[in-house]
């Protein structure tokens, strides 16, 4: 198997468009009804993605004291679900359907302390995090500037879809 970064973006554009419309018309709760069958199908047919997920989770398990993280099939399935929810979070942030009360993030006190002392921070994120949510947090405090460096090669279809529906209308590149 090739490195995960070599795996091409997959996904049926009409399916993504349908799910985006469900979110825009009916909201996240209704979208969640569709999320599990779609992710389940994708997880089952995507052998290479499943293998990359399991390899990644095994590496994380070696550095984590959390016994629930492992390279098992159930953990990999949950990994796919978390990734799908991160995409939904991205849509929610950019479409304005996001409330800070819905947010849980760790290290909040340290981040606030650095911001209050006008110190910069370097935050590293993965696909399990969401840098777009960081931008929404920063919008609460007008004196915070966030510069994000993203590798977008594997999200071109998704980003094109968000652009098509004006979701990225306030985005600066």
Image (spheres, rainbow, N blue to C red):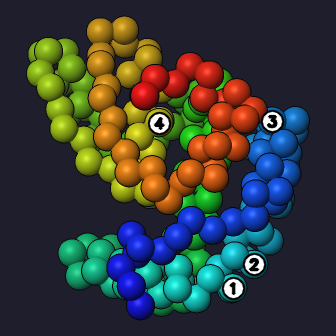
User: Pointer 2: what residue?
Assistant: 41
Location of residue 119 (image quadrant): top left
Q: Which mark is residue 99?
A: none
Query: Mark 1–mark 2 contact, CB under 8 Å?
Result: yes
Tag 4 or tag 2, which sits nearer the N-term? Answer: 2
User: Pointer 1: what residue?
Assistant: 45
Q: Residue at x 26, y 73 (%)?
A: 64
Q: Residue at x 66, y 34 (%)?
A: 163
Q: Residue at x 41, y 90 (%)?
A: 1
Instruction: Decide if residue 98 is in sight here.
Output: no
Please give left or right for residue 94 compared with residue 123 in the image: right
Please give left or right for residue 153 compared with residue 111 in the image: right
Q: Whole-Å distance between the Cαs marked 1 and 2?
A: 6 Å
Tag 3 or tag 2, which sits nearer the N-term? Answer: 3
Observer-nearest residue: 93 or 115?
Answer: 93
Observer-nearest residue: 86 or 63?
Answer: 86
User: Pointer 3: what residue?
Assistant: 24
Dot 1 falls on a residue whose secondary structure is helix
Dot 2 falls on a residue whose secondary structure is helix
Q: Residue at x 87, y 39 (%)?
A: 26
Q: Whole-Å distance between the Cαs marked 2 and 4?
A: 27 Å
Instruction: Decide if residue 165 is in sight here.
Output: yes
Query: Mark 2–mark 4 contact, CB under 8 Å?
Result: no
Q: Whole-Å distance between the Cαs marked 3 and 1?
A: 27 Å
Query: Relative to 169, does residue 128 appear above or below in the rendering?
Result: below
List x then y, in percent, for residue 83: 55, 61
User: Pointer 4: what residue?
Assistant: 132
Q: Whole-Å distance between the Cαs marked 1 and 4?
A: 29 Å
């Amino acid at each position: 198997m090739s490195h995960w970064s070599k795996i091409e973006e997959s996904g049926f554009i009409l399916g993504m468009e349908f799910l985006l419309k469900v979110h825009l018309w009916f909201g996240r709760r209704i979208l969640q009804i569709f999320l599990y069958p779609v992710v389940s199908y994708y997880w089952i047919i995507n052998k290479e993605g499943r293998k990359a997920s399991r390899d990644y989770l095994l590496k994380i398990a070696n550095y984590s004291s959390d016994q629930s993280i492992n390279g098992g099939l159930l953990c990999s399935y949950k990994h796919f679900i978390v990734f799908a929810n991160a995409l939904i979070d991205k849509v929610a942030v950019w479409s304005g359907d996001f409330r800070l009360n819905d947010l849980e993030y760790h290290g909040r006190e340290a981040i606030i302390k650095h911001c209050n002392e006008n110190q910069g921070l370097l935050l590293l994120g993965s696909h399990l995090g969401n840098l777009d949510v960081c931008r929404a947090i920063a919008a609460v405090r007008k004196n915070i500037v966030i510069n994000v460096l993203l590798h977008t090669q594997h999200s071109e279809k998704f980003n094109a879809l968000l652009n098509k529906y004006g979701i990225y209308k306030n985005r600066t590149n």
